Amino acid sequence: MWHSVSMSGRHRSSNQRSTGFNVVPSEHGIATGGPTDPRALGFLKAAYGVNETLDLLSIGRTSLYAAVKRGELTPVKFRKKTLFYAVDLAAFLTKLKEAAK
């Protein structure tokens, strides 16, 4: 089950709106303050749709799906919507930065 955590530590179910950062499933594990912490890169949501991801990464749709095909990004389906976890996007950007060094 998805939860968002408020500053007071109280949990809300996923169907309630939250102004705080949404916690993603533990398999993606957020390292607070670490190099792949999406909040450090300004990501405010737990997951982004395709068009939002294109805007965030400043790339085209073909480049996005090429990264998916190479296994650099993993899309998640929610009904008909394709989403990308903010944690995965932050890790992707971090890897690109490290590769440019």
Image (cartoon, helix red, strand yellow):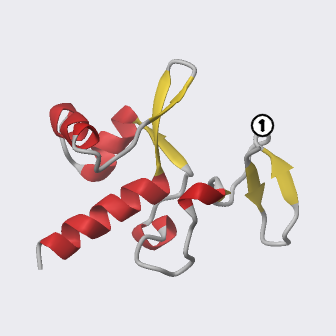
Quadrant in the rendering for residue 24: bottom right
Q: Circle 1 sits in a helix, a strand or a loop, which is it?
A: loop
Q: Write the residue at 77% across / 37% down.
A: 15
Placement of the N terminus among the 4 image quadrants:
top right
Outermost residue to the left: 100
27 vs 81: above or below: below
Q: Write the residue at 59% across / 56% down.
A: 27
Are there few (<14), some (14-19), or many (20+) residues within 10 Å of tag 1?
few
37 vs 4: above or below: below
Could you tell whether 92 is left or right of 15 in the image? left
Could you tell whether 6 is left or right of 72 in the image? right
The percent position of residue 79, horizontal first and vertical second, equals 57, 20
Could you tell whether 31 is left or right of 88 in the image? right
10 vs 13: above or below: below
The percent position of residue 31, horizontal first and vertical second, equals 55, 75
Q: Nearer the viewer, residue 46 or 31?
A: 31
Residue matched to label 1: 15
Q: Write the residue at 35% across / 34% down.
A: 51
Quadrant in the rendering for residue 94: bottom left
Quadrant in the rendering for residue 78: top right
Identify which amino acid the numbered label 1 is placed on.
Asn
Placement of the C terminus among the 4 image quadrants:
bottom left
Q: Nearer the viewer, residue 82 or 40?
A: 82
Q: Write the residue at 55% across / 52% down.
A: 45
How many tags in the picture? Answer: 1
